Amino acid sequence: METSLLRKIDLESGLELEIYDVSRKLAGDRWYVGFIARVEIPITFLAGHADSPEVNIEKMKDVLGETVRFEQKRDRHYIDEKEKDALLNSLMDDFLASTLPYFSETDFFKKYALKAYKKKLEKASWYKT
């Protein structure tokens, strides 16, 4: 899938939101229109998280690697070529309006990374017998 960076937004948390265009032509004048929004969360970002003093950063790195990726996708199918740019901008504007308030909360990304860590640990425990 070919992507191109549309926007970078510095967040209050010190992290960076990147938005990538993943739109492509389907057939004739019809398009798949979409974007992927990503935030790379370094595991070290979790250091000193008050809600989880038991979390060991080194163990998290062993399980998750150096970073956790927050990613969301918005898309529409079979869009007229004349409408694709306006639709892409509208999708992005709606996404930013609804998510930027969450991103500005101080613990949003810490909670997200901790949830990903716990989920991965739980999944790994299914395979142990």
Image: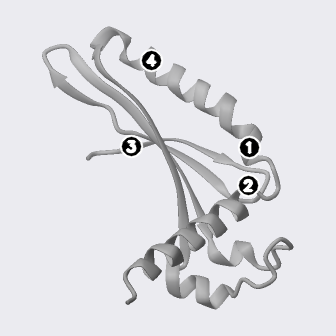
Q: Circle 1: is it few (<14), some (14-19), or many (20+) Cα within 10 Å?
A: few
Give the residue at the far front of this rendering. Answer: 129
* Of the image marks 4 and 2, the number of the one nearer the N terminus: 4
Is residue 72 found left or right of 48 in the rendered image?
Answer: left
Q: Mark 3 or mark 2: which is in front?
A: 2
Alpha carbon distance from label 2 to label 1:
7 Å
Can residue 51 be seen at all in this image of the molecule? yes
Alpha carbon distance from label 1 to label 3:
25 Å
Is residue 77 found left or right of 16 in the rendered image?
Answer: left
Residue at 51% from the left image edge and 25% from the top image edge: 91
Front-most of 55 and 77? 55
**Pointer 4 with pointer 3, Cβ within 8 A:** no
* Of the image marks 1 and 4, the number of the one nearer the N terminus: 4
Front-most of 102 and 33? 102
**Pointer 3 with pointer 2, Cβ within 8 A:** no
Q: In the rendering, at what x and y percent does residue 120 appear?
A: 50, 73
Q: Which residue is mark 1?
A: 102
Q: Which residue is mark 4?
A: 87
Residue at 26% from the left image edge and 47% from the top image edge: 1
Give the residue at the far right of this rendering. Answer: 50
Q: In the rendering, at what x and y percent does residue 30 appear?
A: 22, 16
Q: Which residue is mark 3?
A: 4
Amino acid bearing label 1 = Tyr
**Secondary structure under the numbered disc 4 in the rendered image:** helix
**Secondary structure under the numbered disc 3 in the rendered image:** strand
Q: Is residue 59 above or below residue 106?
A: below
Q: Based on the displayed image, in which of its 4 quarters is residue 45 positioned?
A: bottom right
**Secondary structure under the numbered disc 2 in the rendered image:** helix
**Pointer 2 with pointer 1, Cβ within 8 A:** yes
Q: In the rendering, at what x and y percent does residue 58 appear?
A: 63, 90
Mark carried by residue 108:
2
